[in-house]
Image: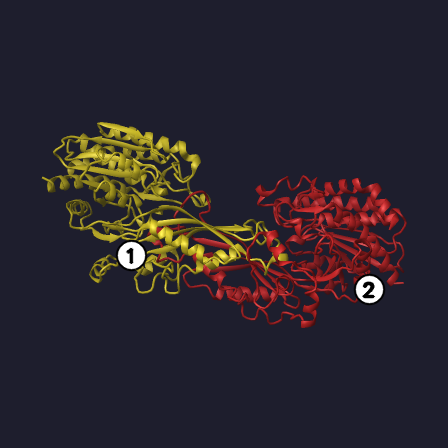
Chain colours: A yellow, B red
Amino acid sequence: MEIINNYIQKNKERFLEELFGLLRIPSISSVKNHKPDMYKAADYWKELLLKSGAGKAEIFETAGNPVTYGEKIIDPALPTVLVYSHMDVMPVDPIEKWITDPFEPEIRDGKIWARGADDDKGQGMMHAKAFELMVKTNTLPCNVKFMIEGEEEIGSPNLGKWCEEHTEMLKADVILVSDTSMIAANIPSITTGLRGLAYWQVEVTGPNRDLHSGLFGGTVANPINVLCSMIDKMVDERGKITIPGFYDDALEVSAEERELLGRAPFNVEEYKKAIDVEELAGEEGYTPTECTGIRPSFDVCGIWGGYTGEGAKTVLPSKAYAKISTRLVPNQDHEKIAELFKNHFESIAPKSVKVEVTPLHGGQGYVCPIDIPAYQAAEKAYTDVYGKRPVPVRSGGSIPIISTFEEILEIKSVLMGFGLESDAIHSPNENYPLEQFYNGIKTIPLFYKYFAEMNK
Amino acid sequence: MEIINNYIQKNKERFLEELFGLLRIPSISSVKNHKPDMYKAADYWKELLLKSGAGKAEIFETAGNPVTYGEKIIDPALPTVLVYSHMDVMPVDPIEKWITDPFEPEIRDGKIWARGADDDKGQGMMHAKAFELMVKTNTLPCNVKFMIEGEEEIGSPNLGKWCEEHTEMLKADVILVSDTSMIAANIPSITTGLRGLAYWQVEVTGPNRDLHSGLFGGTVANPINVLCSMIDKMVDERGKITIPGFYDDALEVSAEERELLGRAPFNVEEYKKAIDVEELAGEEGYTPTECTGIRPSFDVCGIWGGYTGEGAKTVLPSKAYAKISTRLVPNQDHEKIAELFKNHFESIAPKSVKVEVTPLHGGQGYVCPIDIPAYQAAEKAYTDVYGKRPVPVRSGGSIPIISTFEEILEIKSVLMGFGLESDAIHSPNENYPLEQFYNGIKTIPLFYKYFAEMNK
């Protein structure tokens, strides 16, 4: 631990500078004209791995954005850790809500402020610097491989195929991922479950052109009214999703495990206060934590149609659109759900409109058993740094690629997240506390140490 | 008639040029930065009236956009016609759907294409040129006053007050308005009823910031989901608006009058084909024409919230918005309806969100009796030009100021519209057939002639 602390102390400013360089690249994967930035980020990661101690590093093309791969093989007899992270970030709108430029990182109140500060450039950088620390202090006890992709925020559409093409190169004993959160800075936790995701865009077409709402209103179906009505029908009064067959494959969590998960501290009043809502919503019969952790959800992520400018324009619009997502629980297949939704949504459309559903992306859920060596090594590492045994939790978020890894590479992932709820990932003013950043760099080498010991 | 036809024949190109000059001014009243264009339009109208034969013309300031007033008083003993039109136009978005620039008029397929070509620059210009015709051919049988406002498309918020301040100046026997449509180019009709309007913007706020839809989805109410649900509740399965008290004051039309109105030709298949819909919607128990003509309607004119850009961004947004309008029938007071809606909409909001309703504008409905001299003079004028007696119809559109005129000036308005359904007013590619433009200029002097004779 002393070696770790000393090395961090001596190099902490440089670690930040290297992160800032990465944060300045606006690598938004969902916006096509940021394509060149994806290549900049891939190149930045390649150089980063090489100077951190990788024996080799390379940029691989895919049908989409590139993947940066690097490795240091010290002894084929030793266990191998495959680190996964992503170099891409979410869009920044509404841009006007950012206090400072999302792509010009700065330190305020002990936090790093920038798009990607946590998700996932900040957390990814911890692995690069922990790796450097082990190499430079001659304490690296495992072989290490890095796989840094550029399409996580759009559902990793090409990484599965790339993994299939490189199964030999990617062979490892565990995949290590820091792309999740802890319960609080003083309550360490490890995510053991992730929800899946299915995401669509829907387009409702009424008349073939925008009409005068006075001359036609009342006789011609308004596509916005219809879209609202169709969306409303998707979730019933009890918070149940109404798509026929939707829950058929959903893994029910046992009463025993629900009791265990319920032990994670959760203060409903503080939770409501933090987001400024008077009441929570959710599915009948489940606690707020269960609603996000072990139950599916249905959210309209965006909606638009008709006149949205200043003042009052009376119009009966031709079209209305929505971006709709469901979060899925383990065992729900996102492709099957996508099909069920499409069929159901189109079937409930009145004949007065035309409806088109386009799947945009999806991913499966994931569960990590808490009795495998890799999980237990992580548990010990957190305990050393935070002075408390971490709580296993089910997260509501999705990292679709994690279940793909299990399927294709047949390797379990351990989700060593160091984010906090207040980091505002995917929102304006994303941030990452310096303390979590440096604690991550401390914890990771300990994981390697314990994992190597357990595999002896 | 020969005098009329000859004069039009000689001057038809110049009439068009004068209209084109007006159409080139982008006088969009709902967008603040077009304010200077409102003054350009007011000035254009002033010059137009003076060169067409007005004895005087003047621009009046209001709290909003200016009003151009002009008059020619030939003999106080003769009847006086007050012409009302508006110089403002609707916004042009979606601009990408226009085949040619909305503010660079051109002639194609025998039609004038431009924003305002019909509504109401084209129809207003017919009155200016019919007036010129009568002055120049020494056939003007009445005193004439022109009142051209600049805020019709935003509900004429300042014209009522201006009328109150100028009741003496505006004294007249009838108000003549061309701001409506005919059934078809070969089926002349005169609008005898207009719907009123109440229009609001609603804002639904969920959490205080955009949230990660995975981490929070299922527990935190999504304002888009909630807005859709609230909108859906506003109209029931039978097409009835559910706002308590909404129909209390609505004027029911007698079975006898419904039978009469039902005689206007209406081909449901052609109607559906023209707008490319498979089925119509509407209130149970009423025909399509009745649904727009004599019954109220509820339309969402615009909706927006969350991520609306390219690709798939998963977000549980903080806010969702909609622009909502109801069309009202005579006797429904728009201010009372605005209050009823606001109270009801806010009352049905779940506690998981905050809802704010802002009234944007409104206006009362109007009915014109078909037994008054002004209506009968109009009927004869149309019969002369179109060879057929015009059908009285109830229009679904709103010209809120018409009922204000009746209230403040105590003068009935006759709605001599020459628009066609295919003119696409308020939509991209607004147009106005040349034939209707010139037929209007023919019909108007005949109205003056018959109206003067009836008042002898």
Q: Which residue carries the number 1 mark?
A: A250
Q: Which mark is residue B83?
A: none
Q: Chain of mark 1?
A: A
Chain ID at mark 2: B
Give the SS element for disc 2. helix
Residue found at the very far left of the displayed protein:
A456
Q: Residue at x 36, y 38 (%)?
A: A106
The type of residue carrying mark 1 is: Ala
**Which x, y percent locates residue B48?**
79, 45
Cα gap from disc 2 to disc 1, whole angstroms: 74 Å
Quarter of the rendering containing residue B389? bottom right
Q: Which is more toward the observer, A345 or A40? A: A345
| B372 up-or-down from A392: above or below | below
User: On screen, A61 above or below B208?
Assistant: above
Residues A151 and A92: in front is: A151
For residue B373, the mark is: 2
Q: Relative to the observer, which residue lies in front, A447 or A176?
A: A176
Horizontal side, residue A434 vs residue B436: left or right: left
Q: Quadrant of the C terminus of chain B?
A: bottom right
Query: A183 and B137: which one is in front?
Result: B137
Closest to the camera, between mark 2 and mark 1, is 1
Q: Residue at image x 62%, y 40%? A: B99
In the displayed structure, does residue A279 sit left or right of residue B445?
left
